[in-house]
Image (spheres, rainbow, N blue to C red):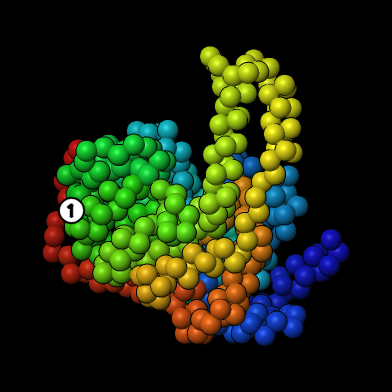
Amino acid sequence: MRNILALTIALTLAGPLLAAPATGDDPNLARARAVLKAQPIIDGHNDWPEQLRDQFGETWWSVDLAADSRTFKKPLQTDIPRLRAGMVGGQFWSVWVPANVTGPAAVKATLEQIDIVRGIVARHPGDFALASTAADVRRIQKTGKVASMMGVEGGSQIDNSLPALRMFYDLGVRYMTLTHVRHNDWADSANEAPRKEPLTAFGKAVVGEMNRIGMIVDLSHVSEGTMKAVLAMTRAPVMFSHSSARAITDHPRNVSDEVLKLVAANGGIVMVNYAPGYVSRKRMEWEAARAGIKASYNAPPYSGLYIGQPERAATALAEWDKANPMPAVTLAEVADHVDHIAKVAGMDHVGIGGDLDGIDTTPTGLEGVETYPALIAELLRRGWSDADCRKLAGGNILRVMEAVEKVSAGLKGQVPSAATP
């Protein structure tokens, strides 16, 4: 603990976010840090704001964000010293609202999440700055700060209102995930049975309006039918802010090779997720089995072996966990997904969207935002060039942002859409 504290203090005093020193004898790690000094990490998805609010409520304002958040009551995967160590120069912060919160309540909750991100930046102007464009990100990175953008993680959060979408954009939201874990009125989620029409006419109007205003369409969480429908009609490149390769782990949240090829043709990007159940087939199967067992023990209000007996249900689940240990997932397995996406879609179409602080556990070696250099080092060890690692780290998402901005500039003559469901 003393060594961790000393390292945290040293990194805090080290100055600019990009100045994390190389340590150890691994030449690939030193090389990775040189890569990230030239092009810092721009991660596609981090849920730190939601975790701060979940743990501290409105008192998050009083929390020391420069403290080691691993010491919090519920340890977090993000804090300022570890962003420095991870050589992070840009972050899309998720402004997430549960999919069962709908209507005006979802809009209100989204505004409250946006307020947290803007509050983080306001409280720590030496560490963060709001970014609206790719040019902003490049400029802010040079100052050693984290260029901060936001992503709305679910189309239900606009309450079927294009004016709400436009106002979110004006407040700094630069992508919207079309669904979360439930279908909404106009697009299908990967987590529910597909409907006859995966993207309705209003859904297409949402995508068109996002193209017009310059908001990136995010296809993480949507069904494959929705992915294909969007890719067939969008004028701008899309992103998958936190998804992995379905050919490696056949999870509906991941991206099939067929869609990867469509993403390449579209000029988009797939940013690889660290969620263990998306990375590892064994872990996905274990999670599904455990969920079934947990429900069988206590599924109120009508069923369960230990219905109405939460203590007995908890004891039985602990015994099951002991007999069925959780399969480990590794950094190397995440690198396998990066490799596969780069092979199928091309080096220009892959990035990193770790989903940190949106996942309870991480792959070994990727425990927090400080670990990005280790992932880059693994890819260098596998034969990736410095130039390709710079693309992965941030160059590819900057290219996507610039392309989306160019499409928006070309649509400036169009009036705002008045479409309704």
Quarter of the view holding residue 135: bottom left
Q: Quadrant of the C terminus?
A: top left
Quarter of the view holding residue 209: bottom left
User: Is residue 408 shown above or below 220?
Assistant: below
Q: Quadrant of the N terminus?
A: bottom right
At x 58%, y 49%, the residue is 283
Q: Position of residue 89 (x, y in %)?
A: 53, 72
At x 39%, y 53%, the residue is 220
Quarter of the view holding residue 269: bottom left
At x 19%, y 57%, the residue is 233
Residue 3 in sight here: yes
Taking depth in this image into account, of 113 and 62 the one nearest to the observer is 113
Residue bearing the label numbered 1: 416
Q: How many numbered discs, if any?
A: 1
Tag 1: amino acid: Pro
Q: Position of residue 5 (x, y in %)?
A: 80, 64
Q: Position of residue 364 (x, y in %)?
A: 66, 60
Callout 1: helix, strand or loop? loop
User: Is residue 246 shown above or below 86?
Assistant: above
Residue 145 in sight here: no
- Specify whether 253 is left or right of 325: left
Taking depth in this image into account, of 261 and 71 the one nearest to the observer is 261
User: Is residue 154 shown above or below 394?
Assistant: above
Dot 1 surroundings within 10 Å: few (below 14), some, or many (20 or more)? some
Q: Position of residue 261 (x, y in %)?
A: 30, 66
- Specify whether 289 is left or right of 105: right
